[in-house]
Image (cartoon, rainbow, N blue to C red):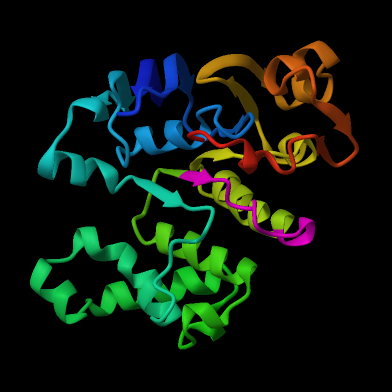
Amino acid sequence: MLEIRHLTKIYDDGTVALNDVSFTVEDGEFLIIIGLSGSGKSTLLRCINRLVDPTEGDILWNGVNLAKLEGEELRNARREVGMVFQHFNLVKRSSVFKNVISGRLGFTPTWRSFLGRFSEADQKKAHKALSRLGIDDQAKKRADELSGGQQQRVGIARALMQDPKMILADEPVASLDPVLAHNILEYLEILNQEDGMTIICSLHYLDLVQRYSTRVIGLRKGEIVYEGSREDIRAMTDEEFKEIYGEEAQRVTGGIEGILDETKMGGQA
């Protein structure tokens, strides 16, 4: 179980990205975080795996406080938490296979990883991950030869190399069209349902939230303003919607009018 207790993040420029955020995530949940750009979604995910250091608060993962760990203890704890990024975060000039097997770097002696000498078991594991994501036939291609949807599948396969118990997905479908968005979320759903893997994912569109989430948290200006189930989202009132997205936002079929260009609003997401 993941427990977030009074988590606060204040950036050096004084921006309060998270303000006293507390919630729990049970094992095997598919939790989706919603909110405008600048609401704190990305900061929250990056605090959980310590890509960003919180200013205050605790991050308890199966009883271990990730917020207090340093060095080797932190590296070992991170092995259980995979990360999927909005812009894929691949080495574009390297092969798909090399990108995926890099997910084993934290388990491999430095000299072996430096020379690219991964074990036979790790190589088989990489091919299995690629096969599971339906792209084993792309293994020898450069990452930048693949479509956006394929590159995101490479990112998921790389995360699987850690044998994670939880995957954090930061806007994983923001740059994809609706068909590919469903395709990527279906893969995450399979990991959630078949492997019992906890998924925490930030998304924009309520139709996707309604389809894939088991629970939802809404952030606004770094604070939790909404918590509910998939059914609660389907029955969301206009008042609840505006509490998350603001008075100027309008609900439309298949998305949220008024926040499609929200990245122009700036701020830490």
- Residue at 28%, 44% in the rendered image: 78
- Residue at 80%, 22% in the rendered image: 248
Depth check, front residue: 13 or 32: 13
Left/right placement of residue 267 relative to residue 237 reads left
Depth check, front residue: 100 or 85: 85
Left/right placement of residue 177 relative to residue 148 reads right
In reply to whether residue 74 is colored magenta, the answer given is: no
In reply to whether residue 175 is colored magenta, the answer given is: yes
- Residue at 73%, 27% in the rendered image: 230
Q: Position of residue 122 (x, y in %)?
A: 29, 72
Q: Where is residue 215 in the image (x, y as percent from the top left)?
A: 63, 26
Question: In this view of the protein, can residue 125 be seen by the observer?
Answer: no
- Residue at 54%, 53% in the rendered image: 86
Q: Where is residue 140 in the image (x, y as percent from the top left)?
A: 46, 88
Q: Range of the magenta residues?
A: 168-180
Q: In which quarter of the image is the N terminus?
A: top left
